[in-house]
Image (tube, helix red, strand yellow):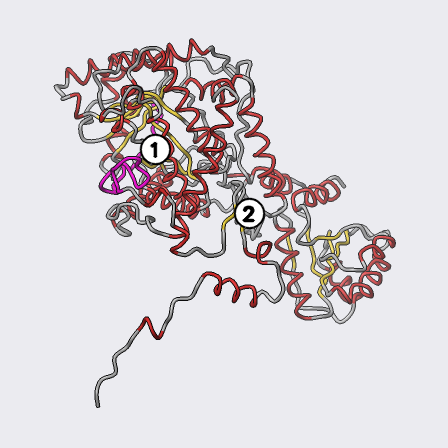
Amino acid sequence: MAEEKLNLLADFPAISTKTWKEKIITDLKGADFEKKLVWRTPEGFNVQPFYRQEDLKGLKTTVSAPGQFPYVRGTKTTNDWAIRQNICACKSARKANQKALEVLNKGITSLGFCLDADKLNYHFIKVLLNGIDARAININFNICPCKAPELANILVRYYGRCGYDFKAVHGSINVDPIKGMLLKGKNLSREQVTERLVATVKAAKTLVNYRVIGVNSAILNNSGAYCAQELAYALAWGADYMTMMTEAGVPNYEAARNIRFNMGIGGNYFMEIAKFRAARLLWAKIVEAYKAPIFTAALKDAAKMIVCATTSRFNMTVFDAYVNLLRSQTETMSAALAGVDEIVVTPFDVTYEQPTEFAERIARNQQLMLKEEAHFNKVVDPAAGSYYIENLTASIAAEAWKQFLAIQDNGGMFEMVKNNKVQEAVAANLKTRLSDVARRKEILLGSNQFPNFTEKAAKKIKETACCGACCNAEKGELQTLPIARAAEEFETLRLETEGANKQPVAFMLTIGNLAMRIARAQFSCNFLACAGYKVIDNNGFKSVHDGIKAARKAKADIIVLCSSDDEYATFAPQAWLELENAKEMFIVAGAPACMEDLQKLGIQNFIHVKCNVLDTLKSFNQQLLNK
């Protein structure tokens, strides 16, 4: 018998997008396709539920190769990146040096030193870098911009005395006056900013592989900025520095090659991959605009966006802090896959103490694992060709460019910061995000959803020292960025409960329909535990009276009725009648059709999926803790 040959094309014919969509609409059984499946992102654009090869047509992100202009697929032909650890050297050069030498033996390939401007001198740098081969790793410095030229001169002198080839040393001096304006409110003039940029560039001219001008959009990320917003401001930030330097006589290629981007990594996995790809594309196009009269090879090479990415603090938590490891790991994966140049993993305990040696070791190992076990450094731009990520890249690029042009129409980044427009826009965005967290539209595991019911955190919270790298820490005249974490308000609420004389006890009075009472009891336990209340679940009671009797035996402060909507019309009035004028708080789990009738009886507390969880729990705390 002849062997039958398979014909995959005949057996599995191509299906059109129209046919796919018709099938999806049929399966939706009347639900609106756009409302049900199309995601309206916080960035301002829509994401479709599926993409196909035809969706790549016309996308410019697919036509370049790694290491080639406009660098959307990366500035390198490998996907290796530097593993960076930041060290505070403000108090002691010797101790900072000891720590640096220690971590260099544990996988670190890039060091970041925070310096006290008042202690800067040649001897300090000599002690700090003693035993460290600057040709083998990247060495980066944070210092007050007014002291940056002096630091550059010291480094040139020190590296020269060490006998280094200046082309062999790599690193950065993070001169960023706009950062000082945003964080400290410093009211600088355009002339002052330009002077600091140009002076540092001139002083560091011998350090050909040092980038001495920083664009620190990570601070926007830590203020709750979304991907496109952070990217738009970062681009405008860099463009202003390019303009200031070139107008002051710095050659265009020299201005571009001195700018380094320090960006944050948010928690939206695929969106962050797309953000960094879009960032390189747009920055290359911006630098290209400075090409007059020609686009030289030197300028094209300088248009490579060098990025140090830092995992976000915005979504890190005090409670259930080990979940921070999961957050920072997915963020690190996003940045690594996107082809950034350096990554800083924020230690998981940074929200409540100075990071311990254990937390710092885990942070290093998170990157080492991606390299040594997952081999993320072996493939360049693995996202290339992905229908979804290519479209995300194009969408973020379009939205960020739109916002970038709006910033330029308003005078550019510097002018908007001077007029507090950036601060106000970021604050408005933060308010929206905190509202989303309060309503559980944005989930923070362990804080506003699925908390650890028994965890206590007050005793582990310690004061943390601030490493400012600034010779003048006093707040200036401008508004400052509202640096915040998404979980802070929930944590404040829970710590308030933890510090109370008595922990409120919430008792689930489960009765009636089995499926509904179980579901609503679980929802209510999760809801109330977000405030740190002790919750007691139950299998079910034969009568409302039995449930109330059991609740009082358990010394409950809160009694939560958990049943079905239909049965609430009977059970809720019974419970209210028995509890009338009692000391226990009475809550109905759900938003039944009979809610208005129940409210007329005097029942005021209802918890359901449409609640503002934070505001509801705040009101409960006010009633329970102030008795």
Asked if the magenta segment contains residue 84, the reply would be yes
**Residue range (magenta):** 65-90
Depth check, front residue: 347 or 79: 79
Q: Earlier in the sequence, mark 1 or mark 2?
A: 2
Amino acid found under the numbered disc labelled 2: Arg
Q: Secondary structure at mark 1?
A: strand
Q: Image height check: is 138 above or below 487?
A: above
Position of 183 with respect to 623 (left or right) is left
Depth check, front residue: 2 or 250: 2
Check disc 1 and report the residue beneath it.
308
Check disc 2 and report the residue beneath it.
40
In which image quadrant can residue 208 be found?
top left
Q: Tell me which residue sits at (17%, 26%) in the image.
A: 168
Q: Image height check: is 603 above or below 473?
A: below
Q: Image height check: is 220 above or below 420?
A: below
Q: Secondary structure at mark 2?
A: strand
In which image quadrant can residue 154 be found?
top left
Badge 2: residue crowd in 10 Å (few <14, some 14–19, many ≥20): few
Residue 579 spot, x, y in % from top left: 83, 56
Asked if the magenta segment contains residue 431, the reply would be no
Residue 409 spot, x, y in % from top left: 51, 23
> In which quadrant will I find the C terminus?
top right
Q: Are marks 1 and 2 in contact (CB under 8 Å)?
A: no
> In which quadrant will I find the N terminus?
bottom left
